[in-house]
Image (cartoon, rainbow, N blue to C red):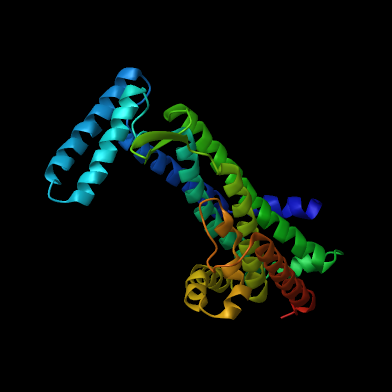
Amino acid sequence: MQYVKNEWIKMWSQKNAWIMLVIVLGLLALVTGINKYYDDPSGTEAERLKANEVHLAENKEWASAAKANNEDLSYYNEEIAKIEYRIANDLPSAQSMSLNEHLNFTLSISIMMISIFTTVIAAGIVSNEFGTGTIKMLLTRPVARWKILLSKLVASLLYGLTLLAIACTFTAVLGFLLFNNDNAITLSIVNGQVVEQAMESAYFATIGYSLASILMTTIFAFMVGSLFGSSTLAVSLSLFILLMGQTATMFLSQYDFAKYIWFANDLSYYIPGSSPMIEGLTLGYSVVVNIVYAILFLAITFGYFMKRDVTA
């Protein structure tokens, strides 16, 4: 535990850890501000009515211009029916962002940024020690090599978890202050009648699957960083492989062997509303594939580090 604490203190003593945190929070604040700027006010009945009447007038104008196209006309007539339903039942406009919508939207941005920044930390935490030569000082201590390496891996994972926790707390506070806290309502036309449905939130399920995905990318980046002495090369190579891996896997998805590729089994594909890259893959199968790859990555990392020559 003491070794993890030492790595944690060392990590936050560097500017880049703080810079990445500031970038995440700054981007989330910017996105939230943009959403609020374009958000339809819905705090009072008068605001909800005004917003819906504006969209009603727009859709009636578009419907009038689309008389020559039956498909477009049908679409706008359905939109008009939905807006009239919102007016009759005092519902916020479709362009009014709810708290759940805000949280889900900002969560997707947070996960994308945190995955990248955690990769940077994990890839550089070992390779940087070799690049600066400080690894020699660490290994002169009467501590097993695997404990030193494990402490760095745990610190990298904790960094990602910390960023996610701070980002989620930050966006939740902004959401409660700026957006409608009622459940988001979606309307659809069924047999000519407007049907009201509450949008179910997949917020916590998304966090769960995303954490598993971040865990795997961190372990992979940590492996790459442990194999190279240059932190720049380790970080660049890790990001390149992670960013290009899914694209390459998509081109290979037509072949049977693609189902064994780690990128095809990323657990983020099982977030509600998403679907696996390759048809037929199941959550259980992908979990097993991820476990196998995690064991392989860790075996390579610890096996190489335990035998690596640091006397040069």
Q: Determine which quarter of the picture holds residue 3.
A: bottom right
Q: Quadrant of the C terminus?
A: bottom right
- Percent across and percent down for residue 47 are 31, 22
Q: Nearer the viewer, residue 206 or 89?
A: 89
Q: Position of residue 36 (x, y in %)?
A: 36, 35
Q: Residue at x 33, y 38 (%)?
A: 192
Residue 13 visible to an observer of this rendering = no
Q: Nearer the viewer, residue 263 or 34?
A: 263
Q: Is residue 8 above or below residue 298?
A: above
Measured along the vertical axis of the image, is residue 263 above or below residue 186? below
**Left or right, 225 with reference to 185:** right
Q: Residue furthest right?
A: 142
Does 275 sit left or right of 29 as displayed? Answer: right
Answer whether residue 168 is visible to the viewer in this image: yes
Q: Is residue 279 left or right of residue 157?
A: left
Q: Residue at x 26, y 45 (%)?
A: 75
* Point 56% across, 37% down: residue: 169
In the rendered view, would you say 143 is above or below 301? above
Residue 135: x and y in percent read: 72, 68
Residue at 65%, 60% in the rendered image: 283
Q: Nearer the viewer, residue 3 or 239?
A: 239
Which image quadrant is residue 88 in? top left
Q: How many marks?
A: 0
Q: How far from the left and from the top, in percent, is residue 146?
A: 81, 67
Q: Identify the image quadrant of residue 231.
A: bottom right
